[in-house]
Amino acid sequence: MRRPAPLPTTPETQGQQDAASPDVRTIRRRRGEAQVVPVSDDVVPIAEDTLGRSKGEAPAGEPSPNGDEAPRLTSTRDVWRAARARRKALRAEIRRFTQRSRRRRIFWLSAVGAVLLLIGGSVAAAYSPLFAVEKITVAGATTLDPAVIEAALDGQLGTPLALVDASEVKAALLAFPLIETYALEARPPHDLTVRIKERTPVGVIRSDAGYTLVDAAGVALSTTSDQPAGQPLIDVAGGSDSAAFESAGLVVRSLPADVRALLTGVSATTVDDVTLTLNTGLTVVWGSAEDSGLKALALSTTMRVNPDASSIDVTSPHLAVVG
């Protein structure tokens, strides 16, 4: 059942009710009618516009009953501003306490970046045409003509120094048997130096083809129909591939320059019986290639003391036998 509507009140009736109940306050309106609740004298009424305030608290911005100004209400914007200020202060404190570590990290990152940039730039420049080969120089050649070797290496001109093909250089130098070893030296920005070491001839071997000039390893350097001047004739059992030839080659290479200039013949049947012949008619019994340095010194001293000797035996370097 519906609740019957309240009787209408007139202004006179409303005034009588207010006069009869002076402590009645209107706190809520519902369905278009007023609801009145009587309160006691010791209770301070709280109206709709003062919800959330304490008992006896004055509206925001107005003086309280004790004379102090009441605090203002906190809005969502004020809360947001306070939180942002708090975060800003926190970040400032973090930056202050981590300043040293950040500086250290920035320093190391900058150093690593600079090194990487330097390496990258150097590699890029080395492989670029800015460092291409424009000049080839041959150093260490005495018997060979450097210009001929440089002409054989012309294929490397225009190639960046870092991309010079060592295998192609080796293939070009194989045409010169007199070259024993070589080394490539890049001299930026455009120079390539080829430093060679020539083989040292120890004598010639006579065969049906003529006289073949060989080094201590038995490598054939050249072949001529006549015996080259200043090169001794080597007569070794087993040829240039034998152990006797290796021993004879080591002996020739250990001779002093003045004795080497007088040498006309080398003979050996084993590694222990190398014999030398000089153009003065002197025969030197050398023996094996062991202690060749001491034997060379003993031979030079004995030849100076005994210039008319016909034979000298230095098989024992500490006791030369003169014949």
Image (cartoon, grey):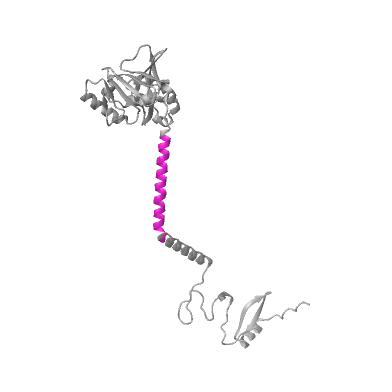
Residue at left 64%, top 85%?
17
Residue 35 showing in the rendered view? yes
- How many numbered callouts? 0
Counting from the top left corner in percent of width and height, residue 153 is at 40, 23
> Image height check: is 297 above or below 234?
below
Q: Position of residue 77 (x, y in %)?
A: 51, 65
Which range of residues does the magenta coloring cover?
97-125
Assess whether residue 114 is covered by the magenta stretch. yes
Q: Is residue 98 shown in magenta? A: yes
Residue 165, visible in the rendered structure: no
Q: Quadrant of the N terminus?
A: bottom right
Q: Nearer the viewer, residue 243 or 215?
A: 243
Q: Nearer the viewer, residue 285 or 209?
A: 285
Q: In this view, does 130 lie to the left or right of 257?
A: right
Magenta-highlighted stretch: main secondary structure?
A: helix
Left/right placement of residue 157 relative to residue 291 reads right
Image point 40% across, 41% down: which residue? 118
Viewport quadrant of the C terminus:
top left
Q: Which residue is painted at 51% across and 64% down in the image? A: 80
